[in-house]
Amino acid sequence: MLLVLAERRFPIASLRVFASANSAGQRLTFAGQSLVVEELAKAAPEGLDLVLFSVGATVSRAQAPRFAAAGALVVDNSSAFRLEPDIPLLIPEVNAAAVLNWAPAPGRRIVAVPNCAAIPLIMALKPLHDAAGIERVTVATYQSAAGAGIKGLRELEAETRRDLAGEPPRAQVFAHPLPFEVLPHIGAFEPDGQTSEEAKIVAETRKVLGLPALRVSATAVRVPVRVGHSAAVWVETSGPLAPDEARHLLASAPGVVVVDDPARADYPRTRLAAGTDPVYVGRIRRDPTVPHGLMLWVAADNVRKGAALNAVQIAEHVLGVAGSMAAGPRSESTPVHR
Amino acid sequence: MLLVLAERRFPIASLRVFASANSAGQRLTFAGQSLVVEELAKAAPEGLDLVLFSVGATVSRAQAPRFAAAGALVVDNSSAFRLEPDIPLLIPEVNAAAVLNWAPAPGRRIVAVPNCAAIPLIMALKPLHDAAGIERVTVATYQSAAGAGIKGLRELEAETRRDLAGEPPRAQVFAHPLPFEVLPHIGAFEPDGQTSEEAKIVAETRKVLGLPALRVSATAVRVPVRVGHSAAVWVETSGPLAPDEARHLLASAPGVVVVDDPARADYPRTRLAAGTDPVYVGRIRRDPTVPHGLMLWVAADNVRKGAALNAVQIAEHVLGVAGSMAAGPRSESTPVHR
């Protein structure tokens, strides 16, 4: 989050950093300035224009309203508020209008960041919906260890080393050892057999696209990738939409980069996406099993566009500050549009 | 293949082993007996009851008919003959009847083993089709490095070591480095944007199930797993089929083991499947986006049931020799049916 704020030259007069009691008192550096971490639960909420929350839903639920009530815009990365009707769930490139004429009640000036697997999916769906009307979406995800936080990433690396050394890999962050394995299990299982991650993808796609009855089904799978979520996506539209037309629409969509040159083995990959801003879409082809069907392959950096970048973009958009929905400085290394 | 023959106590009076000129003259041991590898292209085809081919399609196409013409039953693992109308494409548990009253022309006494990603899919679909009529299948695969042979497996391990040592991983077997990556690219790209692997899954599912118009679409993805292919599967049936009913049908199907206890984080995983015979099915749940839809997660050892085991089972079935379609000795370590 701090890196993204710095990269995008977000106009900051003063910055405070908050964490749990465990981390309070530690020091962080931002733009050459040393900052002391304050204890979130005890911090005075007054005088802040913007508070970016990136904590679990329980802490967000308890703390975010306090800062919003004191006058700040709160941008929250957790699932705490995403589905509440008065809270905008925002991807600025997709549904910027959700905060037009927004008049939040006291303590409700909170905008939610969608789930990190939902954001790239929705970014890819939006231009197709605008052109041909999306009726049904089927998605199988390939989600990285970083989706479970820095502990997930470290567990993947450490346990892969153990595995390669001939020792059995262990699991603390994940339900089973992730090295050289795929696990169809992200979040908690719900009574209907879905996981909470799958339920988020379904519900948030509907809310952000403003299509409460959209038919969406998802299987969410953890894969041994460090950073970067991928997805195989099937889209059924009400009108015809040829792959070339979809490719053209996606190539023109803000924040989307089309990488689709099979002859050169070029398609979205997490090694392309990690550390960059765009959502990459490729392998765009017809699904011949329905009248109007397309198949896509999508990849994005789940820590950037899936979380920190989208949060900062929300702040830029709602506060109307300088900053751009186009990719930031890091995108210099972004592959050119093909 | 030799391991499976030994495990299943396949009745062998004498055994010959063939390979390319490069490997001719090497020695292999089977059941305590030392065997000298013969050069396939120069070998006399006479006097063999059964020849198991596990080579590329080009070599199979050139050599298999020669052995079939000399009187052997040829079981071929390649894609060379799979879609030819007079060649049975066989999964004994699924379409044993395909070799009933089979009267092959000279040189055509060849039975083909389906693709290693298609076999577990079809094994999971068959009981559902018999009960409720399958209309459409959507599948996203998670295929292991071993699907590209021993070289693929070695490349994954060696390059993962390089990656963890801070060196950039390389790719020779795969189109891009596979460590900590997922690649939506197996086989070659075809003009319609599908890969050859995806086309195989579609065409072979239709042929084995005897449903030439079945609507199937697939995205085939290589993942950094050593051995074991997994898949997220959506099935639309013409009649109703509740998840509990599907679970019951699958649990009764030969060669299938249901592992579906989300409360205990129990679902098919490649670490369960690798080295064992069954096809594992779990995460069986309703797809609420269609009138009659189910979602499944499937995993199997792609080297065993996906190739060698299925080939030996075909030989047992066609030759009517002792042997069982039930799992062999290795399945002692198979998790019990849950």
Image (cartoon, coloured by chain):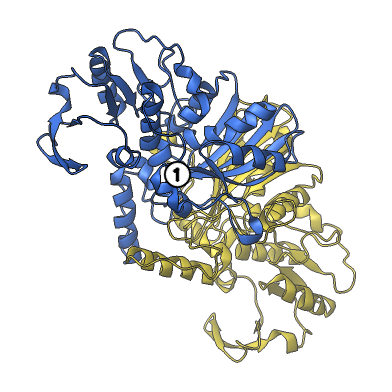
Chain colours: A yellow, B blue
Whether residue A286 is visible: no
Near mark 1 (Cα within 10 A), the count class, few <14, some 14-19 or many ≥20, is: many
Left/right of residue A105 with respect to residue B267 in the rendered view:
right
Disc 1 is placed on an element classified as: loop
The residue carrying mark 1 is: B143
Question: Foreground residue, B216 or A144?
Answer: B216
Residue farthest to the left, as pictured: B25
| Percent position of residue A89, x then y | 76, 58
Left/right of residue A244 with respect to residue A207 in the rendered view:
left
Q: How many marks?
A: 1
Left/right of residue A62 with respect to residue B223 in the rendered view:
right
Q: Give the vertical position of B150 relative to B292 (above or below).
A: below
| Percent position of residue A299, x then y | 54, 50
Whether residue A38 is visible: yes
Q: Give the vertical position of A115 relative to B98 (above or below).
A: below
Left/right of residue A41 with respect to residue A183 in the rendered view:
right
| Percent position of residue A276, x then y | 51, 58
Question: Foreground residue, B279 or A250?
Answer: B279
* Residue A320 placement: quadrant: bottom right
Q: Give the vertical position of B199 relative to A269 (above or below).
A: above
Residue at x-position 68% and y-position 66%: A77
Residue type beneath disc 1: Gln
Quadrant for the N terminus of chain A in the image: bottom right
Residue farthest to the bottom, as pictured: A25
| Percent position of residue A264, x then y | 39, 37
Q: Chain of mark 1?
A: B
